Amino acid sequence: HRDLTGLAGLAPWEILFLLDEAEQWVELNRQPHKRADRLAGLTIINAFFENSTRTLLSFEIAGKRLGADVVNMHAAQSSVKKGETLIDTAMTLNAMRADAIVIRHASSGAVRLIADKVDCPVLNAGDGQHEHPTQGLLDALTIRRAKGDFGKLTVTICGDILHSRVARSNIHCLTTLGADVRVCAPPALMPAGIEAMKVTPFHDFDAALDGADVVMMLRLQQERMSGQFIPSPREYRHLYGLTLERLAKAKPDALVMHPGPMNRGIEIDSTVADLAGRSAITTQVEMGVAIRMACLDVLTRRSRGVEGWA
Ligand code: CP
């Protein structure tokens, strides 16, 4: 079987195939009756070792809309709290003969570790600072539907790049699809050697915004900070917050994105986050359900005896 632990290394056609597959589910999800029976009889386990609203709910909705039985394991209410190891937890889930396991974990690499131990496809719902592949895909789908050809686009990603698995998955995805990607962060929140990821780093947000087609803001991840010097929230907003005034430096029709959850008034002002016709933040959430339906469908094709994605 095949897993989805990250977008690094995927070919452009593989990413585009998943985006194309998701289109049918965008249409279905806009109908009053939102059910297809493609995954009927399958069991999907969502094992979340870290908090989530969007990713957990949309994976659950995605599985249910495709007819699967979906069960959620919240680590806070599980035997993880009694000291069970990650591997033992993985072997326990495997013994229940799940057909797909979706995992979120605070440690980079934890999802790969589990994927190597279980017999079914594993989907990464975000692991530490490593990757959040379905977020990268849903962002790409949102951008493609609004702006078309990636090769003509400049995308500015601004915020806590250092701690962001969302940034990493988006960088892999968007550079693979041919977009010009700029990353912008205070020096303490910019990973060393980021140029190797085929992006242009900026510390000056105004310069990074100049002529951008898409502006993607990231949350300041205070929970992952360990000793980095960062400006106060007020200073951060002054230097790196997306205000209406700042947004004017990007193209007049530039799309505004944020993966959520937002720190309103810090990395993004409410006037921008709620800007009709420009903010794609709720569209991103909508695309998340369709992308997760596509990923669950495609990754379980082989076990269902359907021509797969190999
Ligand atoms: N974007 C995202 O991953 O949100 P959650 O943490 O709410 O799942």
Image (cartoon, grey):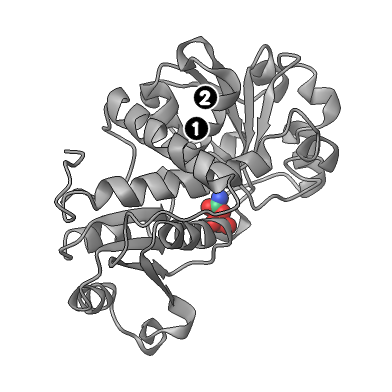
Where in the figure is residue 111, as x and y percent of width and height? 30, 58
- According to the picture, the residue beneath numbered tag 2 turns out to be 144
Residue 193, by quadrant, is: top left
Instruction: Classify residue 218 by image quadrant.
Output: top right
Q: Mark 1 to mark 2: distance in Å?
A: 5 Å
Kind of element beneath mark 1: helix
Which of 249 and 20 lies nearest the eye of the viewer? 20
Q: Is residue 257 left or right of residue 109?
A: right
Residue at (44%, 63%) from the top-left corner? 64
User: Which residue in the structure is indicated by mark 1?
Assistant: 141
Asked if residue 28 lies left or right of residue 267, the reply is left
Residues marked 1 and 2 touching at CB (< 8 Å): yes
Q: Going 80% across and 35% down the picture, which residue do you hit?
A: 272
What count of labels does the image hold? Answer: 2
Can you give x and y, in whole percent of width and height, for residue 303 in the image?
16, 56
Dividing the image into four quarters, tell me where ligand 1 lies: bottom right
**Whole-percent x and y of residue 291?**
44, 43
Numbered disc 2: secondary structure: helix
Q: Residue furthest bottom?
A: 82
Residue 35 visible at all: yes
Q: Amino acid at mark 1?
A: Leu
Residue 59 sits in which quadrant? Answer: bottom left
Rendered view: 45 above or below 166: below
Q: 119 or 247, which lies in front?
A: 119
Q: Amino acid at mark 2?
A: Arg
Rate crowding at label 2 as few (under 14), some (14 to 19) or many (20 or more) other CA atoms within 10 Å.
few
The image quadrant where one finds the C terminus is top left
